[in-house]
Every structure is written in C-alpha cells, then in structure tokens.
Image (spheres, rainbow, N blue to C red):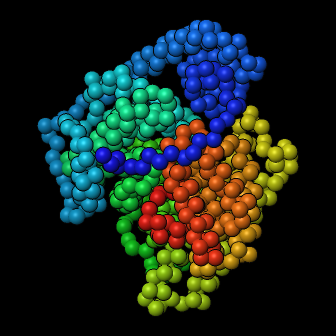
C-alpha cells in the first residue's frame, strides 16, 4: 500500500558522544551537556563522564533500566494528567446542528476542498463533525502523542520560535490544537512520524501516522464545507492549511503541498485585507532594507485587517511567507505573494499604532526578513526572464539592470552581516557562549542570514546565466561553506535545506561535494526519517551525476525539474 508521503531514510551517522543513560535505554541522544534533552524530558538522571558500573555489568544494568522505566512511567502519567486538565479547560461547546455548507463559486476553498477529497480517499476514516474536539476524544495514547509533539516535534519544526509571554507566548498553540480537528490530527501524525524512529513497534506508529494524516485532510475538508475559508472562521482554515503543509513537509515534502500553499496564501491575503492581484510582468528594481532594520509600508494596511489572535496570525503569516519564497526553486515560478512579502512582514496589531512588533521571520525560521524577500525577488526576475524568452519580449538590457541592482543590494547587506559576525567572533574567539543568551541568539540569526544571503547570490548567478562558470560561483560557494562552519549547533542545518541544495548543486570538486553530503547527513542523525533532508541529498547526488555526464554545472532548479520531484525545500 502506498503511503501519501515519503519515508526515505538518510544513512545514519553513529556517534559515541551520547550520555550513558541513553545508551543503556538504547535511545538516540542529542548529546547536549551537562544533561541531554531526552533525559530531561522524562526526568531521569543524565550520566556523562566516567563509565558507570551498570554499563558493563548485566545485572546492575537490568536493575538500573528497571529503575529508569519506573521514573519514565511516572513522568508520562503526570504529563497525560496535565494535558487532560488543559484540554478540558480549553474546550468549547460545539453546535453541530446549525452547521451549514458554504462554498464560493470556484473559490480557493472549493479548489482545496476537491483536492482534500481526493487526498483523503485512501484508508478513509469515519469522522463525526468539523467542530471543536470533545474532551472524551483525548484518550491516554493520543495525549501522549500530543505531549510528544509539544515537547519535541514542534521544536524540530520551528526551532527558533520561542516568543516571550509579553509577545504572546505559545499558549495559543495548545488552544488551537485542542479546539481544531485538522490541526490536532496533523500534529498527532507528525508525532507518530517521529516516534517511528524509536525502538517501539514501528508498524503501529505507521498506522497511527497514516490514520491521523487522513483525518487531518478529511477534517479540513469538512470544516471548509461547513464554514468556508472566509469570515470569522478564515483564521482557523488558514492555520489548518499551514499545519497540514508542515505535516507534508516533515513527511518528506513531495506530496500535493502546492495546492495547500496556494490556498493558504490566498487566505492570508483575505485575512489581512489585501486584494489578490496578479504580479506585474516586469518586476521593479528591488529595494532592500539593511540587516536588522525595520521594514516600511505598514501604514498602508487598514487596522481592521488583523484578527484578535494576533500571535497565531503573525506566526502562520510568517510561516507562509517562508514557504512561499522557498517553494519557487521547485516550481520555477514567482512567489505567489511576491508583491506582498514586505507589507505582510510589517503586519501586526501593535505595529499599526507605531510599536515595533512586526513579523520577524528570524523568530520562526532563523533568517532575517531582508534576505528572504531578496530570494523572492530573485525568483521573480527568473520567472520574468523565462516568460520574456518564451514570448520573445525580453528586454535584455532592462533585465541586466534589474539583476545588477538586486545583486548590489544583496552584496551590500551581506557585507554588513559579515562585518558584524567577524567582530563577534573576534571578541569571543569563535561563537559567543550560550549563557549570553541575547548575543548568542543574535549571532545565530546573523550566521543563518548570511548563509541564505550567500546562497541567494549563487541563485542569482544561475538566473543571470543559464550556464554559470565555476569561476563565477566559487567565491559565493566558499562564503556559504565558511558561514556554515560558524553555526553553533549542527541541528540547525535541518532548517537550511534550501541553501544546502542551492549551493551544494554548484559544488564541482570532490572535496566540496563531500562537505555538503556530510553536512546534510549529519544534520539529521537524531531523526533521519523526519523531514525532507533525504530528498535534498537525492537532489545533490543527481546534480553531481549530471555534472559528470554533461561536463558543466547543473543548478538546483534544473535538477529538480529533470527529476520530476517537486520538493518543498524548507
């Protein structure tokens, strides 16, 4: 039976640096010291340092393992009890009898509804209503999966999202998950996917994964039939689309994600009071803001365009901008929201009153706004160039001028980031210490921004020339590789699939290719089945293979087109 997503394994890289407790339990250790996160999550003592006697003594090892199992069981019971208590407080009473179907004439919701009906046919599951969950639905097993999602999976999905309480916190996430069926089942599907990599019964978790994935699709279909994708329920449909997109992404990112991304993109424009208009045939010269500066344009957005749940709206809007920009390398089209990226990133309820509370993409995916918007601009002029070539209307001089200005803006901002990074590394002889939280987070954001910006310059070179030379690419490639060595935590590479593919495909020497191969494989050693790094590695290997066959560099977009596998490289 074919599953609706890929479960390709990346070859694991074994490590002998894990804690003794995880080794005894035969668990994958994240190797965080002085105490790993896996041990902390179940409240057991994490042992590093000298080899404990129970490692070599079978009897002592069995006694220690039984002791640990009792602690883990008690911890799981406490978590389930806490989750049930939170769920019961968060629930709302449904009114099923009055639900009516509302579908616009060939609206985004209707288009998505048709797709959802087709996607949810295999292993169809009976569902009851598209309205909020009842407390009785949350049994102990699902509660455990949900806690696993909140404790571990969400962190892997959105590593940089940790807002303060004053900024809204993450309480909205638990509330939405327990009140919105599509979000709930998508989260459980992701949790089951990560659980597949433990030593539990894999067949059972695979069934859980498929069941909750199909339920998420079916529940979203029913929700849209009952409420439409507009009005007061638009934010729920929006959030559900984003989470199902994330679900597809972290199951491998090769399913029908384009339909969900398009629907979510149209809903976000409606939520923010922006009209859906086609992009202009000829892009205006890019106007980049300098690093870490505040983007302009929020005064043009009407106050009524924002929902009451500002924290959730900001998060989902930022996630869609992120997906929309990076999807273009696979679709070879301009970003659907390309005319709105800078305006949407400024949207928030308080920013309309003059406060600095705009959407900051680095708090969601690690990279500053200006670099992501610049990538969108590169994709936009690529689509413009290709359309002009097909129609015979391309003004090559105008194109060259736009590309030159875009390159100059990228290089200028990238240089500023480089200067600041060098100063920080000089002051601390490398990355700043982790306990200097603000400086450490700023440093991490700058490193990730530089990686994306350097990769964007390589992407731009492939747009300017359909056959870029190794000489034109070499400096940018070296800059990407150097910036990647600055990352303080190798687990952050999981969110750098796009620059790894864009830059890695242009690696021509065996040494450079081995760098990108090892980087991708090493980034997912904690959970090799979770995410699309396996597909990214396949893209790199195929690109290098075509290099050898054709005697020239083959860029990432061309490789994806020839493979016929449209991966969302997020």
Q: Position of residue 476 (x, y in %)?
A: 71, 67
Q: Is residue 548 above or below residue 466?
A: above
Quick check: 253 left or right of 486? left
Residue 269, percent across and down?
39, 60
Between residue 67 and residue 547, name the one nearer to us. Answer: 547
Residue ranking furthest to the left: 97
Name the one closer to the observer, 478 or 75.
Answer: 478
Q: Position of residue 102 (x, y in %)?
A: 19, 53
Against 471, residue 312 (above or below) is: above
State which quadrant residue 130 falls in: top left
The residue under the point 69% across, 31% down is 16
- Number of marks in the rendered image: 0
Tell which of 4 and 398 is nearer to you: 4
Is residue 158 visible to us here?
Answer: no
Query: Residue at the spot x=33%, y=48% of the render?
Result: 2
Q: Is 489 situated above or below 559? A: above
**Residue located 61% across and 66% down the image:** 544
Residue 421 % position (x, y) = 78, 53
Q: Is residue 467 visible?
A: yes
Q: Quadrant of residue 281?
A: bottom left
In the image shown, does 260 or 363 lie closer to the viewer? 260
Residue at image position (68%, 77%) is 469
């Amino acid at each position: 039976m074919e599953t609706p997503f890929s479960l390709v394994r990346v070859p694991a890289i074994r490590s002998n640096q894990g804690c003794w407790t995880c080794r005894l339990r035969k668990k994958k250790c994240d190797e965080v010291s002085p105490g790993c996160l896996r041990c902390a999550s179940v409240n057991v003592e994490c042992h590093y340092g000298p080899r404990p006697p129970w490692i070599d003594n079978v009897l002592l090892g069995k006694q220690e393992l039984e002791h640990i199992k009792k602690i883990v069981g008690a911890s799981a019971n406490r978590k389930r009890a806490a989750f049930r208590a939170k769920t019961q407080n968060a629930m709302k009473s449904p009114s099923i009898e009055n639900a009516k179907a509302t579908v616009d004439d060939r609206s985004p919701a209707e288009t998505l509804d048709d797709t959802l009906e087709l996607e949810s046919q295999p292993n169809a599951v009976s569902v009851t209503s598209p309205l909020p969950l009842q407390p009785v639905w949350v049994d102990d097993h699902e509660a455990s999966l949900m806690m696993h999602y909140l404790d571990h999976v969400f962190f892997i999905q959105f590593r940089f999202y940790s807002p303060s309480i004053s900024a809204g916190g993450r309480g909205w996430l638990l509330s939405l998950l327990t009140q919105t069926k599509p979000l709930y089942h998508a989260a459980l599907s992701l949790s089951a996917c990560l659980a597949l990599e433990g030593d539990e019964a894999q067949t059972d978790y695979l069934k859980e994964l498929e069941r909750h994935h199909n339920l998420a699709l079916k529940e979203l279909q029913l929700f849209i039939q009952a409420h439409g994708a507009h009005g007061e329920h638009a934010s729920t449909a929006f959030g559900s689309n984003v989470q199902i997109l994330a679900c597809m992404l972290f199951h491998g990112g090769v399913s029908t994600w384009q339909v969900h991304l398009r629907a979510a993109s149209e809903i976000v424009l409606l939520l923010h009071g922006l009209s859906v208009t086609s992009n202009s045939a000829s892009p205006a010269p890019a106007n980049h803001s300098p690093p870490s500066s505040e983007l302009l344009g929020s005064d043009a957005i009407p106050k009524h365009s924002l929902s009451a749940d500002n924290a959730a709206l900001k998060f989902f809007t930022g996630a869609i901008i992120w997906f929309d920009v990076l999807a273009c390398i696979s679709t070879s089209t301009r970003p659907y929201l390309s005319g709105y990226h800078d305006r949407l990133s400024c949207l928030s309820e308080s920013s309309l009153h003059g406060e600095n509370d705009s959407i900051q993409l680095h708090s969601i995916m690690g990279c500053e706004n200006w670099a992501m918007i610049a990538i969108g601009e590169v994709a936009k002029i690529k689509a413009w160039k290709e359309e002009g070539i097909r129609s015979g209307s391309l003004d090559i001089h105008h194109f060259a001028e736009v590309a030159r200005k875009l390159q100059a803006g990228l290089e200028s901002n990238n240089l500023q980031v480089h200067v600041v990074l060098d100063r920080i590394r000089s002051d601390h002889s490398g990355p700043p210490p982790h306990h200097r939280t603000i400086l450490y987070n700023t440093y991490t954001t700058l490193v990730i921004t530089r990686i994306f910006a350097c990769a964007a310059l390589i992407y731009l070179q492939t747009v300017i020339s359909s056959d870029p030379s190794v000489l034109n690419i070499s400096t940018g490639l070296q800059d990407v590789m150097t910036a990647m060595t600055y990352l303080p935590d190798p687990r952050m590479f999981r969110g750098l699939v796009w620059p790894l593919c864009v830059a890695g495909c242009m690696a021509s020497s065996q040494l450079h290719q081995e760098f990108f191969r090892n980087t991708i494989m090493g980034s997912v050693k904690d959970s090799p089945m979770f995410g699309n790094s396996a597909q990214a590695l396949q893209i790199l290997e195929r690109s290098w293979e075509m290099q050898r066959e054709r005697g020239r560099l083959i860029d990432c977009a061309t490789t994806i087109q020839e493979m016929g596998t449209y991966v969302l490289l997020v």
